């Protein structure tokens, strides 16, 4: 038995139950096309002008989270246990403007660590880490204001070339100091102060290389001379023994006299 309006009621029931499924499907497609991700479980995400701020400070993280929201504009990772910034660590964050990695244990920054955010990044904080050196390519084309203070920097040619290309935070520039140096007298002094005094670590590097090459060449030359002396002395000894042997042989005149004596007797 069919009740009036039964088909219409069935359609309403179908639409009522299927619409949430369809809506979720389209939301999933939109999310995948935008490469959006949920907020990492160890972090807290909030909104700023329609974009995402990701707060991951003091969460005992040992590496940079990989599942960050695509629209992240500020990423705060300070006071963790991160030791390395790998290549393309932020490649999926094209809107990233602020990156705080201060007070970690970072020792290594790969050459392509900031690929993908060189144009967007405005503030980069790497203070209070364990960095002694970084490759020249790591900060190439970055327009951000950078804080590199309170790291155990080793002052040498590569660091000088890196600093020459950066826009250091002017408020912290005097806190970027030489913990160690190729020239020991500059240990403990601000890097910028040393460079402003006219010191060129790259010249010192070239001089050191030249001295090393000279010492190496001198060593080889000494070995060659020593071998020649040994060879001459060894041959002289052989020549002397051969000469003494020849002297010990009877001379031809003595042999002739003996032969004449024998002939006379006969």
Image (cartoon, helix red, strand yellow):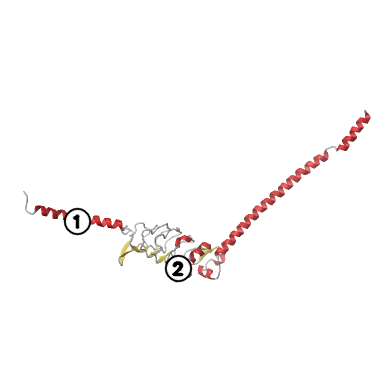
Q: Secondary structure at mark 2?
A: strand
Residue sitting farthest toward the top: 266
In this rendering, is residue 199 above or below 244? below
Q: Earlier in the sequence, mark 1 or mark 2?
A: 1
Give how far across and how far down residue 99 sits, in percent: 39, 64
Residue 70 found in image quarter? bottom left
In this rendering, is residue 129 above or below 242? below
Give how far across and how far down residue 90 sits, in percent: 38, 59
Label 1 packing within 10 angstroms: few (<14), some (14-19), many (20+): few
Question: What residue do we see at 89% from left, 35% from top?
Answer: 256
Asked if one can make out residue 156 in the rendered structure from this viewpoint, the answer is: no
Residue 110 found in image quarter? bottom left
Residue sitting farthest toward the right: 264
Q: Secondary structure at mark 1?
A: helix
Q: Which mark is residue 52?
A: none
Of residues 215 and 36, the one nearer the viewer is 36
Q: Is residue 251 left or right of residue 6?
A: right
Of residues 209 and 42, the one nearer the viewer is 209
Mark 1 highlights which residue? 19
Asked if one can make out residue 261 in the rendered structure from this viewpoint, the answer is: yes
Mark 2 highlights which residue? 167
């Amino acid at each position: 038995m069919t009740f009036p309006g039964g088909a219409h009621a069935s359609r309403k029931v179908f639409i009522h139950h299927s619409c949430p499924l369809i809506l979720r499907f389209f939301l999933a497609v939109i999310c995948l096309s935008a490469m959006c991700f949920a907020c990492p479980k160890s972090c807290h995400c909030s909104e700023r002008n329609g974009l995402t701020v990701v707060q991951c400070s003091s969460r005992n993280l040992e590496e940079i989270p990989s599942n960050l929201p695509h629209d992240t504009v500020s990423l705060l990772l300070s006071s963790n246990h991160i030791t390395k910034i790998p290549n393309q660590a932020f490649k999926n964050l094209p809107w990233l403007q602020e990156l705080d990695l201060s007070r970690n244990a970072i020792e290594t920054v790969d050459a392509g660590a900031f690929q993908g955010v060189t144009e967007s990044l405005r503030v980069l904080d790497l203070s209070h880490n364990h960095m002694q050196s970084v490759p020249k390519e790591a900060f190439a084309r970055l327009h951000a204001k950078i804080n590199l203070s309170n790291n155990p920097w080793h002052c040498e040619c590569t660091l000088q070339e890196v600093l020459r290309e950066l826009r250091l935070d002017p408020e912290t520039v005097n806190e970027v100091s030489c913990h160690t140096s190729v020239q020991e007298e500059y240990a403990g002094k601000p890097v910028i102060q040393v460079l402003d005094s006219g010191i060129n670590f790259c010249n010192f590097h070239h001089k050191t290389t030249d001295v090393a090459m000279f010492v190496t060449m001198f060593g080889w030359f000494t070995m060659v001379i020593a071998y020649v002396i040994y060879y001459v002395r060894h041959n002289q000894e052989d020549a002397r023994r051969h000469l003494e042997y020849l002297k010990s042989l009877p001379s031809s005149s003595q042999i002739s006299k003996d032969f004449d004596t024998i002939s006379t007797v006969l």
